[in-house]
Image (cartoon, rainbow, N blue to C red):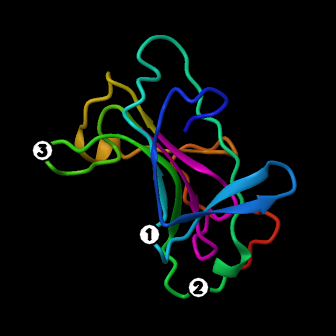
C-alpha cells in the first residue's frame, strides 16, 4: 500500500521485509529472485509539477556478482506501445544507476518523457545525471570508482 495514505494498492513479487535503522522496516528487492514492486497506473504529472521520491541502498552482497549488467534500474514507470516497451517514448520516468564497470558509475541517471515527447528515433534517447550532466557517458571522478 502507498504511504502515508493507503490510496494505492500494489503488488510485491520476490521481495522481503527487512529491519532498517532509519525506517524500521524496508522492502528488499533481489535481482536474482526477479524482485519488484508494481503500483497501479498512478496519474501523476498530468497537470503541473510532480516529484518522485524514494530511498534506496545497494545490497553489498550484490557487489561482486559477475552477472550484473551495466545498469541497475531503481524505478520505472511507463507503458508498452503495441506490445513493445521503449523507455524513450512518451509518458516515461526511469531512474537507474550505472554499474561499477560503467564510466559514469556513481551517479543516478534519469530518463524523463512527458506526453509532449513523441518518439523520434535516436534523437529521443536522452537522459540526465544527478551530477547535472546531460547525455554524458564520460568517466566520473567519484569516490569509490575504480578504473
Judged from this view, the residue extending furthest toward the right is: 21
Q: Secondary structure at mark 3?
A: loop
Sequence-earlier tag: 1 or 2: 1
- Tell which tag, 1 or 3, sits nearer the viewer: 1
- The residue nearer to you, when weighing 51 against 28, is 28
Sequence-earlier tag: 1 or 3: 1
Report how far apart the C-alphas of labels 1 and 2 lie in the structure: 15 Å
Q: Secondary structure at mark 2?
A: loop
Residue designated by label 1: 34
Give the numbered dot on residue 82.
3
Q: Quadrant of residue 6?
A: top right
Q: Secondary structure at mark 1?
A: loop
Q: Quadrant of residue 49?
A: top right
Residue 51: percent from the left, percent from the top? 59, 27
Residue 101: percent from the left, percent from the top? 59, 77
In the image, residue 95 lies in the stretch drawn in magenta: yes
Asked if marks 1 and 3 touch (Cβ < 8 Å), the reply is no
Q: Which residues are magenta?
A: 93-111
Give the numbered dot on residue 125.
none
**Residue placed at 44% from the left, 41% from the top?**
39
| 37 in relation to 71, above or below | above
**Residue placed at 26% from the left, 30% from the top?**
118
Asked if marks 3 and 2 touch (Cβ < 8 Å), the reply is no
Give the numbered dot on residue 65.
2
- The residue nearer to you, when weighing 130 against 47, is 47
Classify the position of the C terminus by image quarter. bottom right
Classify the position of the N terminus by image quarter. top right
Amino acid at each position: 500500500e502507498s504511504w502515508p495514505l493507503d490510496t494505492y494498492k500494489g503488488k510485491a513479487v520476490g521481495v522481503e521485509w527487512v529491519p532498517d535503522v532509519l525506517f524500521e522496516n524496508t522492502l528488499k528487492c533481489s535481482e536474482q529472485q526477479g524482485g519488484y514492486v508494481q503500483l497501479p497506473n498512478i496519474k501523476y504529472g498530468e497537470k503541473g509539477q510532480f516529484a518522485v521520491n524514494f530511498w534506496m541502498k545497494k545490497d553489498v552482497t550484490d557487489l561482486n556478482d559477475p552477472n550484473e549488467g551495466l545498469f541497475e534500474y531503481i524505478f520505472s514507470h511507463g507503458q508498452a506501445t503495441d506490445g513493445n516497451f521503449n523507455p524513450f517514448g512518451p509518458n516515461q520516468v526511469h531512474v537507474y544507476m550505472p554499474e561499477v564497470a560503467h564510466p559514469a558509475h556513481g551517479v543516478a541517471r534519469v530518463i524523463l518523457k512527458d506526453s509532449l515527447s513523441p518518439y523520434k528515433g535516436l534523437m529521443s534517447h536522452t537522459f540526465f545525471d544527478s551530477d547535472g550532466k546531460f547525455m554524458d557517458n564520460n568517466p566520473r571522478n567519484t569516490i569509490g570508482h575504480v578504473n
